[in-house]
Structures are given as structure tokens and as C-alpha cells.
Amino acid sequence: MALVASCNVLQVVGFQNSGKTTLVEKLIKRAKQFNLCVGSIKHHGHGGPPDSSSELKDSHRHQQAGADVAGVEGGGILQLTADSKDWSLKKLIDFYQFFSPDVIFVEGYKKESYPKAVLIRSEEDLVLLSSLTNIICVISHVPLKKEVQRAYPMFHLQEDELYLNFLLKEVGEEDEPALI
């Protein structure tokens, strides 16, 4: 019998330097205000194992924001320091169940199918909207055309309160009242 995730998962995706780590930090801090047990998973998407630069710093930022479990994965290496040939996102989420999180925030793994918030830095990043699945909202650095705004719930990067409230409602338990 396969282990089924017993918590909600939210992906935060976007191209490099779009604000993914900052958004995950904000989500962790807000979730902790509601006394939720939070896990975070960062994907090292540049090939090979994580190095001692940005990914470890980002994972540390998740931990500093209050994540109860924080890790970075890349090239088969999970920086909780466990070795496996296949650290798929599903396997990581199953592993995180040991820590009984209420929610897991995932930074990266664009091609996975969990609910996701997409960060857009410029019009060139709009290609993400046609190549990704399960998009629940878009958070943009720049104003976007009306047709894009009609397709998804849309927030400007400066609208922290609006998109944090929206995303926490999305990851709230279906049988419980909204978190906010």
C-alpha cells in the first residue's frame, strides 16, 4: 500500500530570481502564525547535487522563517543528508509525512502537478503559464494583459496580504474553516 500524503502541498514556481524563496519564507511565517507544522522542500534545478551556495542558504532561510522541516534536493542528494538514487518529489513528500506537517511548501519542481503559485518577472516568463499544470494563481512583478488576468487569480508582487491570504486559504484543510 502506497503512503498517501496527509497534508496539503503548495508549489511556488518561477524562473531564477523571481522571488520564490522570499515568497516561501512569507508563507512559512504566516502559516506559523496559525501554529501549523510546516515543511519546505527546495529543488536544486541546476543539475547535480546542491552546493554550499544559494540552495543551502535558501533552505536555511526557510528554516529561519520557521519551517519545522527544511531541505534541498538535487542530483539525488537530499540535504537532510540522506542518499538515494531517486529523490522524486512524491518520495520527498512521503518522507516528510514522518514529521506530521500540516502543509508542505515546495520551491521549484515546475513539472510536478501539485497546486502552484507562479511568479512572473516579465512578459517573457508568461511561457510558464502555457507549460505548467495546476496553477492556482499568478503573482507578477509587472502589469499583465487582461487576457492573462482573466485566466487566473492575479496578484501584483506588492499585494502581500492579498496573495498570502489567498494561498493560505487554498492550503487550508477542506473539512476545517479557513486558516485566516
Image: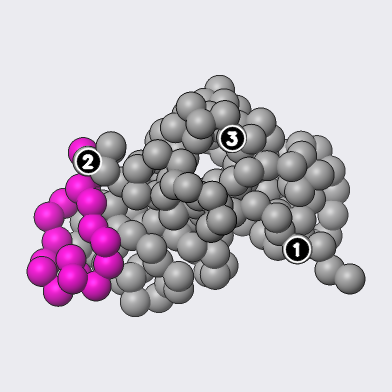
Q: Find the distance from the CA under tag 2 to the CA under tag 3.
A: 23 Å
Which quarter of the picture shows residue 150?
Answer: bottom left
**Three-letter amino acid code at disc 2?**
Glu
As drawn, 79 above or below 86: above
Q: How far, Cα to Cα, is label 2 from label 1?
A: 34 Å
Residue at 35% across / 42% down in the picture?
Answer: 164
Label 3 secondary element:
loop
Q: Which residues are magenta?
A: 141-158
Q: Tell me residue 177's x, y (percent).
A: 48, 47
Answer whether residue 150 is magenta in the image. yes
Q: Name the N-terminal-most of marks 2 and 1.
A: 1
Quadrant the C terminus occupies? top left
Answer whether residue 5 is magenta in the image. no
Q: Residue placed at 24% from the left, 72% from the top?
A: 151
| Picture quadrant where residue 39 is located | top right
Q: Which mark is on residue 4?
A: 1
Q: For residue 43, say whether it is visible.
A: no
Front-most of residues 58 and 7: 7
Q: Mark 3 belongs to which amino acid?
A: Leu
Residue at screen point 23% across, 51% down: 155
